[in-house]
Amino acid sequence: MSENLRNDEEVATQRRARILGMAYVDTSTMQKQLYKNLLPKEELYELKAVPLQADPHNVLFGITTTTPQTTMQHLTHQFLDQRISFAIISDTGYRDFMRLYDPPPAVVYHDIDVNSSNSADLAQQVSETLDKVRADDMLGYLVSQAHRLNASDIHLETSPDSVRIRFRIDGVLHPVATLTIEKYRVLVSVIASAGNISTSSEETQQGHIGQRVRLADGQEVDINLRLETAPTINGLDVVMRLFNLSPEMYHLDRLGLSEDQRSVVDGIISKPSGLVLIVGPTGSGKTTTLYSMLNSLNSDERKIITIEDPVEYQFPGISQLSVKSVEGGDSSFANKLRAVLRLDPDIVMVGEIRDLDTAHTALQAALTGHLVLSTFHASSAAAALTRLGDVIGENPLFVSAVRLVMAQRLVRRLDDTTKQAYQPTSAEMTRIYEVLKDLPPNSPKPQLEGLRLYKPGSSAENPYGYDGQIAIREQFTMDGAMHQLFETKHELLTTQQIEATARASGMRTMLQDAMLRVCAGETTLEEVYRVIG
């Protein structure tokens, strides 16, 4: 309770005591002393009275305005050898005393260990912890543990009789707890209130939570989440995407770009205009790549504006606009982008190109002296241009505007302390030779003779054998043969035609990039096939 509310309650209690003709004590300012030998805590609850002062001859009891009249009679007859008096105290004052007489059991926030060999025991332990704490502490505890485990998402999934909680760590979901339906209703109401969403909506919703909470054990937790909700037949499913607010995490040096990839990226983003597209599915690290580029470009000489739905990371020196992407509405990406261009930016980031209007506006901005960075949902770099062509049709601006297209995925990195070398089978070596035989000249050439591959090992600390994620990429620039392809072909090009031209121009495919990582012992064939297919 805030100090102002407590003062208001004390004033109202004092006024009520004056009307009743009784003494009043402000317990918020007094030194509290316990007299546990006078009455057991069960009787203090039953009588709704607490001893405020006591000596061998006198006892002063604090009672509330709702304490029954019979309580005073009962206490007077119970302590015949002492002079008994009464004073009115506030309800909050009474509860404060009772927390001292009957302190709540201490909640121990055990760290969640997804590497535990017995996931059932883990889920039971975490579920019991969550069942003991208040709802806002549940959210803070889950977020703190997700941060500790470097999880990217928290999934709350309803079923007829319970709700499962899972963390996505290194791209893989791990169950951590199960809640009762009643407990989940309390948790989801707190999430909905903080994220400004409705628990009764029949539509999917998006929201954002940005706040700092203090848990019962004194720990403070920064909560910065993007919410995605979906009404299922069993209730409201929620996915909470965690954001890391440290700007140091978003720099080109941390992206794991190879030397040739980094050289191309540096050359493109140093130019004053053009469109840079980062493509891939949800959770492939597109936003991290975009912000790493922006962070590298951020300087006093440049004006940078972003348009996002929602703003995911905040950086000093960058003007960031949050927009609800309602197509055709006043708050759509395209309308916001047109307004932003009137502010004379050097660099603009559009969170995602989703519709024809936004695509046209982004291309026009790229042609009129702005460097435009954006994301696009596509399965590969070549497919991104095919899809973009489907959106805008045959447009001569298309070829001139696009500078760089980069597609990426995330695969799990092997734990170097536990990974185990093995001799690949003939089928595996045949597949590796097949993928790498057409590597472009500027790519590193692994030594395949006597090649040893690695598989995940196991330890008590890390039974899964993986540690973090690495990005696998493919990228090409719109120059040379690629530029000529789009100028000479008047019909819509296929993904296969674009990819063939890009490879002939020196593009290393995502599968080739991944296979180089396999040969370097950074990940496994199974992981590559899981992510790429």
Image (cartoon, grey):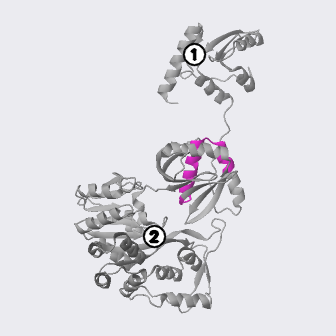
Q: How many marks?
A: 2
Let me know if residue 164 appears in the view.
yes
Residue 280 is labelled as 2
First along the sequence among labels 1 and 2: 1
Picture residue at 52% right of the left edge, 90% below the top? 433
- Where disc 2 sits, the SS reads loop
Q: Compared to 1, does 114 lie above or below?
A: below
Q: Work out how far the residue at label 1 is from the one at label 2, CA to CA, in angstroms.
A: 66 Å
Q: In the figure, is residue 521 to the left or right of 357? A: right
Q: Quadrant of residue 75?
A: top right
Q: Residues within 10 Å of mark 2 (few under 14, many from 20)?
A: many
Q: Position of residue 94 (x, y in %)?
A: 62, 23
Q: Which numbered dot is residue 307?
A: none
Residue at x 62% of width, y 88% of height = 425
Q: Is residue 192 magenta?
A: no
Query: What range is drawn magenta here?
Result: 126-152
Tell me which amino acid carries mark 2.
Gly
Residue 25: numbered disc? 1
Q: Nearer the viewer, residue 402 or 129?
A: 402
Q: Position of residue 165 (x, y in %)?
A: 62, 55
